[in-house]
Image (spheres, rainbow, N blue to C red):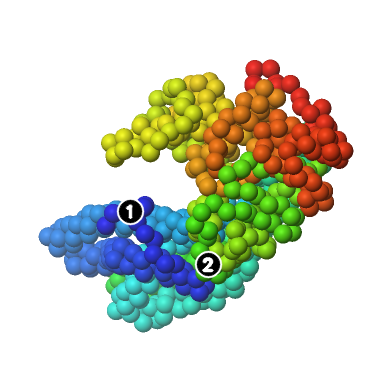
Amino acid sequence: MRIDAYEDPGPPERRGGWWYLAWLVRRQWPRCLAGAVFASVWMVLLAATPYLMARAVDHGLEPGDLGALAGWTGAMVAVGGVNTWLGVLRHRTMTKVRMDANFRTVKVVVGHATRLGAALRSQVGTGEVVTIGVGDVQTISASLTAVGPGVGAVVAYAVVGGLMVSVSVRLALVVLLGVPLLALVIGPLMGRLQGRETEYRERQSVLTARIGDLAGGLRVLNGLGGKGLVADAFRGDSGRLREQGYRVGAVTSWIQALGVGLPMLFLALVTWLGARLAAQGQISVGELVSVYGYVVAQGWPVAFLIEMGHQLSRGVVAARRVVAFLRLEPPPDEGTREAPAEPAVLHDPASGVRVLPGRLTALATSRPSDATEILDRLGRYTPSDATWGDVPLAEIPLAQVRARILVAAPEADLFAGPLGDVIGAADTYLRGAGNCATSHNAPADATQQPVADELAHLSALHAAAAEDIVRALPDGLGTPIEAQARNLSGGQRQRIRLARALLTDPEILLAAEPTSALDAHTEATVADRLKRAREGRTTVLAATSPLLLDRADVVHHLVDGKVAATGTHRELLDTEPGYRALVARDAQDVEPAEEGDPAR
């Protein structure tokens, strides 16, 4: 059975950690069954070697029958060859079991994260998601070794016990009572390990989130002089996590030490008892050899049983974290009313902002967070009484809102990959940017679709004044971009985000500070092209740049999150002292671009 990394993983089990592990087994039960059979036969044949050796000694070596000795020896060689082949099959099958569990868990986690959408960050930290994706997924997949070697260990343990009974009931009881004794000794440690592992994973997710925050804000911390303070705090947190890791490792080391040491004690005890029985003539020399071999062979099942318990203890902790994530739900979508069929006014009663259809509207405020909150309400990312036409936004199905209203956040994520993929480009124009067009028409038929797609992407790049970025990169749109586009400057990242938003061509575009990282010349170019590209479409910009405000059809001056004045940029300059002071300050803050970078 092959593993399809892109197949539907199926609805995951959310009732608990053990239920989730059982679901992973059920989703690939033929493969798990094959792994259990291969492991069981493999371990039983390990125990067959001492049996054959005993026959060779008693029937061949001791009486001097070379034919019998050769026959039993040949049987041992044949069993060893078959067992080697079974070992390969077992390992290969269990590798596929782990890979399937890994891919399946990744797909359900990523799928659920996509389903949560904008609600993800408000319900779970970034570090939690990263820890699940990096650590818990691997732990869960490793725990599924229980369905192969784990099952095989139980079968082999029973078979070896039966063989021991045929030699000596007393020796069999000593061996068979060994595993229950191990369970009594190691069982409490397994429960302790789960508690320590849970606490460790929680702290690890917090620290992982902090690492991401530090990596993203290192330049800001350097500028503010706070790098040392944050480094000291991080050093303390990581030290506490390290100590917690030591405690987890201490429990694990005791489990592994007992798992190795106790079977050796049983081996010594059984060997001593067997030697006494052989000396008394109660068992033959061959049976003594077989007893020793059985105990040695029993070490494999015992080791796998202990490993199974260890892996399951860790796996169920990881599975509980995955289940807790899968239980998160986005806010209920109770919308039942249709969105306006034609372009309509967006109104936010809390601030008094009215967005007229087909116009370029600007929100100017000294507190950017006020404008961002308005955009979130108009885009239905936060509960509000905002309306679209005469219909409350909350009563419109969310899918309709998302299909027609786009909120372009200033720090929207940029995923790693070729630049063309980052902005949504197709392979037909990964060779370079070419000549940018300012408009495009729908293709007359399917054969024109690649050309129309190319024009659309080039138009978006042109409107965002991003053609120079493509030209400067060694492979154009095919150049690999790091996560969050860290290998681009701040201004370049901002223009790439704007091009991506313009490419979607939404009916309503809500953008926060789309040019804040650009120099004055580039910002003026973007302002002119953006207005032309969005002609006849509804656009709202949160900005205080006079270059953008001068191109706006309507400007709302906000004070304490509410509309204080409305008009054109020039009208407000003449009539509103507060607006004039805000814009004048922003104009004075414009800095020249860094040398070699037209956009900061």
Name the residue located 63 percent from the left edge and 31 percent from the top edge.
527
Q: Is residue 309 above or below residue 235?
A: below
Q: Which quarter of the rendering shows the N terminus?
A: bottom left
In the picture shown, does residue 386 fall above or below 522?
below
Which residue appears at 49% of the width and 43% of the height? 504
Q: Residue furthest left?
A: 67
| Of the pair 66 and 528, the residue shown nearer to us | 528
Q: Which residue is mark 1?
A: 4
Say what secondary structure mark 2 lies in. loop
Q: Amino acid at mark 2?
A: Arg
Give the alpha-carbon distance from disc 2 to disc 1, as whole Å: 40 Å
Please count the marks in the image. Answer: 2
Residue 277 as seen in the image, left or right of residue 484: left
Please provide percent x and percent y for residue 161. Answer: 35, 76
From this viewpoint, which residue is outermost toward the right?
577
- Res 298 → quadrant: bottom left
Classify mark 1: residues with Cα within 10 Å, few (<14), some (14-19) or many (20+): few
Looking at marks 2 and 1 on the same chain, the residue that comes earlier in the sequence is marked by 1
Could you say which disc has been placed on residue 457 in the image? Answer: none
The residue tagged 2 is 337
| Residue at horizontal 63 percent and vertical 60 percent from the top | 387
Labels 2, 1: front one = 2
Direction top: furthest residue: 595
Image quadrant of residue 363? top right
Q: Is residue 498 visible?
A: yes
